[in-house]
Amino acid sequence: KLPSKVKLVDVGPRDGLQNEKQPVPAEVKIGLVHRLQDAGLTEIEVTSFVSPKWVPQMADNAQVMAGIRRKPGVRYSVLTPNLKGLEAAVAAPREFWPDEIVVFGAASEAFSQKNINCSIAESIERFAPVVEAAKARGIQVRGAISTAVGCPYEGEVPPERVELVARLMKQIGVQHVGVADTIGVGTPVKVQRALEAALRHYGIDEVSGHFHDTYGQALGNTLASLEMGVWQFDTSSAGLGGCPYAKGATGNVATEDVVYMLHGMGVDTGIDLDKLIDAGAYISEQLGRKPNSRASTAILNK
Ligand code: HMG
Ligand code: MG
């Protein structure tokens, strides 16, 4: 039995745009957030407070957060890898704070080193005060577990590694974990094993799927997750994106494609597909390309 309701977190403004070579103006990022919330998205991952030397595209984080017209009922999240990031995210007046922050670790040592420049154990030590400081301000905390099925440097990653990171994140008070297939190599049964590993430490309402679509498996992986009762997913408008530290990895599964699939199965998302397609078309046009969504392409060509 499938969940009757699904929540999608559009990570397009963050995961989708972080790897763009050309600078994307803050007004365009803000324009995308506005279109996504108008389409009915209730959770949007807006930006990240990371080193601008590592990810220059996200250097306008504070400007973007301050420029959003907040819509009641929508939650805005940002990535904060360390205390410096958290402090930057709350340096602005309270109305510009994120509702949720994301600490991001990995299930493989090599990816942890490449992405955040420290070991898994060190990352947990760094995250602990971030989690505490966020919660003290009433900000919720999500954790991302990258390379949960495969790593660009180490190859296949066993579920025990996911289980370990989920356990460590639980110990430091992270409230929700996202199981991330960073490079899109996962297939449905492997993804189910990785989710099961996270579910040993988190409840079904506290685990989400984050699937990149590099190998075209992300919709299948989403359906396999739904069959386990997982009902929250990170998706990216127009299939934008990729991780700068995972060469060749493409964007997250397109929000449009997931919405089309869910609505076709009678699962409610609260999202207006036509408006969502407009949002994806807007950002794609700004980037000078076509939306990387099959559903969007099909509907726009009708
Ligand atoms: P580090 O070099 O180890 O940190 O970087 P450090 O503490 O030694 O500081 C070095 C310099 O960075 C200093 O500046 C700090 O001030 C500065 P300097 O003195 O040289 O001028 N710095 C910062 N500046 C701004 N904001 C900060 C910050 N922290 C330090 N928060 C760090 C460690 C994590 C910061 C760095 O490795 C980094 O920024 N990495 C970027 C990671 C990233 O954004 N990756 C992409 C997002 S994760 C992802 O896409 C995966 C996900 O989608 C799930 C999936 O698909 O797998 C979530
Ligand atoms: Mg990602």
Image (cartoon, helix red, strand yellow):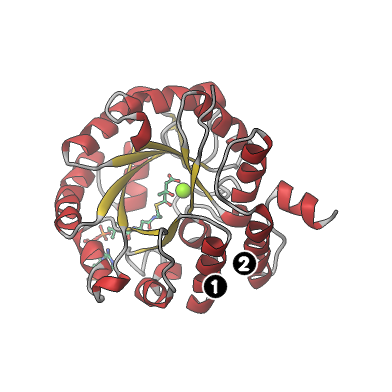
Note whether 197 is above or below 176 in the view shown: above
Badge count: 2
**Which residue has dot 1 on it?**
31
Confirm whether residue 162 shows in the render: yes
Q: Residue placed farthest to the right in the image? A: 302
Rate crowding at label 2 as few (under 14), some (14 to 19) or many (20 or more) other CA atoms within 10 Å.
many
Of the two numbered discs 1 and 2 on the same chain, state the one appearing first in sequence: 1
Q: Is mark 2 within 8 Å of ligand 2?
A: no
Confirm whether residue 158 shows in the render: no
Q: Quadrant of residue 217?
A: top right
Rate crowding at label 1 as few (under 14), some (14 to 19) or many (20 or more) other CA atoms within 10 Å.
some
Residue 99, given in percent of the width and then of the height, sits at 31, 59
The alpha-carbon separation of the residues under discs 1 and 2 comes to 8 Å
| In this rendering, the label closer to the viewer, 1 or 2 | 1
Residue 26, given in percent of the width and then of the height, sits at 48, 76
Q: Which amino acid does the dot numbered 1 rest on?
A: Gly
Mark 1 near mark 2, Cβ–Cβ under 8 Å? yes
The residue under the point 54% across, 38% down is 184
Position of residue 69 in the picture relative to residue 82 (left or right):
right
Note whether 68 is above or below 232 in the view shown: below
The residue under the point 58% across, 45% down is 253
Residue 248, given in percent of the width and then of the height, sits at 57, 48
